[in-house]
Amino acid sequence: MAENVQSHPATPVAEAQESYKRFGPGQRFEHIVLLVTFSGLALTGLPQSFAEHEWAKVMIDVMGGIESIRIIHRILATILMAEAIYHGGLLTYKLFVLGRRATMIPGLRDIRDVLQWIAFNLGLRREHPHLPRYNFGEKVEYLAVVWGTVIMVITGFMMWNPIATTNFLPGSAVPAARVAHSAEALLAVLSIVTWHMWNVHIRRFNRSMFTGRLPHDAMEEEHAEELDQILAGQIDEDPSPQTIAKRNMYFFPYAFIVGTLLVLGLLFFVTFEQTAITTVDPAVVVQTDQTLEVSADEGNAETGAAVWASLNCSECHGDNAQGGEGRLNVALANTALSFEDFVAAVRRGPADMKAYSVLDVSDLDLAHLYAWLQSQ
């Protein structure tokens, strides 16, 4: 990779302006996909996990409601899983066709680097450790992404396909998966906000994932061993075209079979079950101008008394609808509301009153209830 080193006078000023290639266009594209999907998943996932809090309710409303946020979350999750499949194929190609080393795998050398790095920061060592192409911190972050993605995919499948899950596991596995999914998501976000942002955006703004290149001073601190190798011309050479062509003969059929199976698995993942319950705002179940098929004349006051008790209306309106000590304390006895307005109010839940959909109480039961109120 001699093109990585531009010719320049051997002066400190010129040396400080030098930059070195770190990432190609494909790697930078993968990073952008990961950046967009991770951020989107966090913004749409955390409000669902903490939906009882006011800030989460505001975020859900801003993003179009719970149905919209669910759809966005699942689309982004599908893109992330597709990216993981692509990354696995690209990594396999580099290892088995190009013969690259698995430089992201931690080893004993990383333990030594950590100890030297701690000693340097404590002032017990004068020289900063000479770190390789991927230092121990980057390896930890990479493995955290891999581990986190695996956890999120497994628990996501269990929540996305609960019926299939409970065919093999106890029913308690689904809520357990939800807890694990939420906890891993929160851990990932906190890790990005603290460790990653500090090292990549605050301590020094590392533009290499956007420009592909890293300045000389950053290379000296974070990848000094690789910098020495570049300057010494010690680079990994690609195999000969003949060798690559021969290896491709074995790799591409394998990649096609495995890739096809993984893509089919992804399609199975996202289409196998349709179990999400569509949420309906009770306010739109019955509109004020909607024609009721039941009239007030069909109501029976005695039956209405039973409906009143079954719905626990006395908690806020009193035993005889004369007003109570609850948070509403609104009298409904001998109400002046028309039957149509009464039904609409019950459906919408005015002020702090709970909204009752047709699943909670039928129109006929409301006619009975209205008759009882009129008799009080």
Image (cartoon, rainbow, N blue to C red):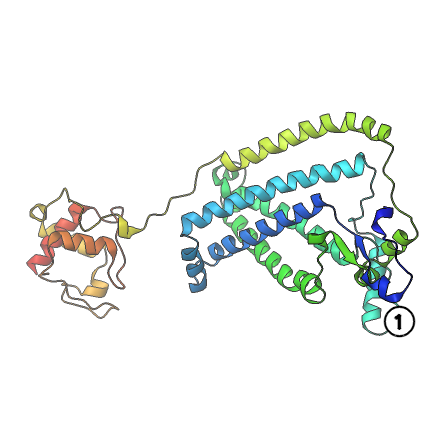
Residue at 58%, 50% (x, y): give it.
Answer: 36
Residue ID for mark 1: 126
Which residue occupies the foreground of this view, 176 or 364?
Answer: 364
Q: Quadrant of the C terminus?
A: bottom left
- Residue 130 occupies quadrant: bottom right
Task: Specify whether 26 is left or right of 124.
Answer: left
307 or 108, nearer to the observer: 108
Q: Position of residue 90 (x, y in %)?
A: 72, 38
Pick the front one: 328 or 12: 12
- For badge 1, the amino acid type reads Arg
Look at 82% across and 65% down and name the residue there: 117
Q: Position of residue 19 (x, y in %)?
A: 80, 56
359 displayed left or right of 87: left
Total labels: the figure holds 1
- Image height check: is 11 above or below 347? below
Residue 239: x, y in percent?
A: 86, 35
View extreme (bottom): residue: 123
Tell me if residue 124 comes above or below residue 223 in the rendering.
below
Residue 75 at least partly seen: yes
